[in-house]
Amino acid sequence: MGESFGAVARVGRPLTPGPSPTGGEGSRRVDCRVATRSVGQGTQKARILRRNQTPEEQMLWHALRNRFLTLKFRRQQPIGHYVVDFVCYEAHLVIELDGSQHAEEAARAYDAVRTEFLEAGGFKVLRFWNSEVRSNLEGVIQSIRTHLP
């Protein structure tokens, strides 16, 4: 059969019975898209990263999530045009977990620029290797504790 389209009318105004006339009010295009909350690219990327955490990020998040030392940590948060792994806004602390790709020169240069940006914004940046989180989670937690107020 034919296609069926939904129609929406303002309260108190009947729908017109036929197609709009050519000219006059009917000649204007009407944007019928549903209004949605606008989210930036950083927020969209952060949501995707939260859903696709690495095992090391999951391990550390499990340790930080329930008000670690009474402080609230957030994971995969946009700050400027970067998305950081973990941040505690109260302590101005960013925690980044790095995989082996961060050992490459291009990645190290990118990380240096990113760290400089975050530090210019008042954040202390701590970096840990994924292998360190896997093999010594308690040591990583102790290191984080020493940088908290």
Image: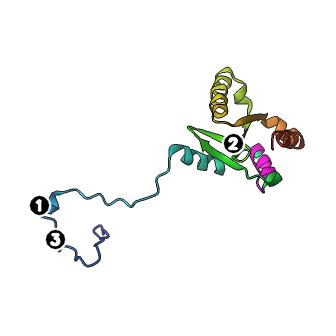
In terms of image quadrants, where is residue 81? top right
> Is 114 on the left or on the right of 149, as rendered?
left
Residue type at numbered disc 1: Gly
Q: Position of residue 101 (x, y in %)?
A: 70, 29
Q: Which residue is mark 2?
A: 85
Q: Position of residue 124 (x, y in %)?
A: 73, 35
Q: Which residues are magenta?
A: 56-66
Asked if the residue under mark 2 is in contact with the one under mark 3, i.e. CB atoms within 8 Å, the reply is no
**Rendered residue at 68%/20% (across/down):** 105
Q: Secondary structure at mark 1?
A: helix
In terms of image quadrants, where is residue 136? top right
**Rendered residue at 30%/71% (across/down):** 8
Residue type at numbered disc 3: Gly
Dot 3 surroundings within 10 Å: few (below 14), some, or many (20 or more)?
few
Q: Which residue is mark 3?
A: 18
**Rendered residue at 76%/54% (across/down):** 65
Q: Secondary structure at mark 2?
A: strand
Residue type at numbered disc 2: Asp
> Is 3 on the left or on the right of 109, as rendered?
left
Residue 33 among those drawn in magenta:
no
**Which of the image's four quarters has the C terminus?**
top right
* Front-most of residues 64 and 14: 64
**Which of the image's four quarters has the N terminus?**
bottom left
Asked if the residue under mark 2 is in contact with the one under mark 1, i.e. CB atoms within 8 Å, the reply is no
Alpha carbons under labels 3 and 1: distance apart: 15 Å
* Front-most of residues 5 and 30: 30
Q: Secondary structure at mark 3?
A: loop
First along the sequence among labels 3 and 2: 3
Asked if the residue under mark 1 is in contact with the one under mark 3, i.e. CB atoms within 8 Å, the reply is no
Is 99 situated above or below 23? above
